[in-house]
Structure formats: structure tokens, C-alpha cells
């Protein structure tokens, strides 16, 4: 279910130039998204909340888009996460993420 997609700029170059490092990153990705105690969907919703709390527009949009595509996450589920962002991180990150969520779910 998890796609081997890394959004960091430069990861394609790492893959080309340092296969050992790239495979270590792939292994770390698999270790993190293993769903032992929390299912993958819950982990993905947490990732959305963290990206939104950091006011990282690019990461927030990509997390929401992949959650929608891979897991069928709904706008209501994302809004519930963003309510926690509002409580813990404030109005600015909440508003920024809300605009992104609205854009993603209009598509």
C-alpha cells in the first residue's frame, strides 16, 4: 500500500549516486510505516498533522494528496486532524492547512 515516494529534493540523485544510502532510507521508511500498533491510515493522519503544525505547505499538500489517493482519507478526517493543529499550533498553521485541504478535496 505504501508507495516508495520520497518528496525531498535530491532523493532521485541520492538514488542514482549512492544506492547504499538510498536503500537505507527505503528500509527506514519501511520500519516507520510498519503499522505495528497504529494502522497506516492513523500514521498518515498523524503525518498530516505534523506537516500542518510546521506550516509546511508542500509537505502538508503531499501528505493529504497521498492519504486521499492511497487510503481514501476523507476531507472530514483531515479537518478533524486540523482541529487538533488549531488547538496545539494556532490559527496560522490551521488556516494554511485548511486552504490546502480545501484545494486537494476540490479536485
Image (tube, rainbow, N blue to C red):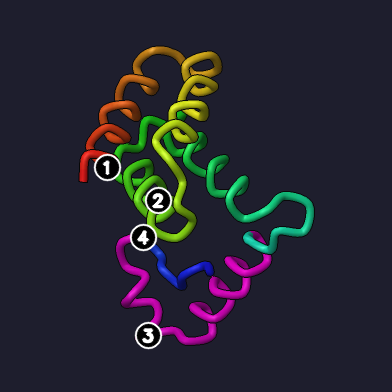
Residue 72 spot, x, y in % from top left: 45, 52
Q: Residues within 10 Å of mark 4 (few under 14, many from 20)?
A: few
Q: Which of the two discs, 1 and 4, labels the residue nearer the N terminus?
A: 4
The image quadrant of residue 20 is: bottom right
Proximity of marks 2 and 1: CB atoms separated by less than 8 Å:
yes
Residue range highlighted in magenta:
7-32
Distance in Å between CA atoms under marks 2 and 4: 16 Å
Q: Which of the two discs, 2 and 1, labels the residue nearer the N terminus?
A: 2
Q: Which of the two discs, 1 and 3, labels the residue nearer the N terminus?
A: 3
Q: Which mark is residue 71?
A: none
Q: Nearer the viewer, mark 3 or mark 4?
A: 4
Residue 97 is covered by the magenta coloring: no
Q: Which mark is residue 7?
A: 4
Q: Which of the two discs, 2 and 3, labels the residue nearer the N terminus?
A: 3
Identify the residue at the far right of this view.
37
Q: Which residue is mark 1?
A: 104
The residue lying at 55 percent from left, 74 percent from top is 26
Q: Nearer the viewer, mark 2 or mark 3?
A: 2
Tell me if 34 is positioned left or right of 29 in this view.
right
Q: Which residue is mark 2?
A: 68
Q: Which mark is residue 17?
A: 3
Amino acid at each position: 500500500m505504501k508507495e516508495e515516494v520520497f518528496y525531498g529534493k535530491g532523493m532521485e540523485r541520492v538514488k542514482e549516486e549512492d544506492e547504499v544510502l538510498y536503500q537505507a532510507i527505503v528500509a527506514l521508511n519501511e520500519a516507520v510505516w510498519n503499522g505495528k500498533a497504529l494502522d497506516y491510515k492513523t500514521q498518515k493522519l498523524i503525518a498530516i498533522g505534523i506537516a500542518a503544525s510546521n506550516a509546511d505547505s508542500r509537505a502538508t499538500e503531499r501528505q493529504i494528496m497521498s492519504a486521499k489517493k492511497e487510503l481514501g482519507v476523507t476531507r472530514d478526517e483531515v479537518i478533524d486532524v486540523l482541529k487538533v493543529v488549531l488547538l496545539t499550533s494556532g490559527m496560522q498553521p490551521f488556516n494554511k492547512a485548511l486552504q490546502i485541504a480545501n484545494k486537494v478535496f476540490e479536485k
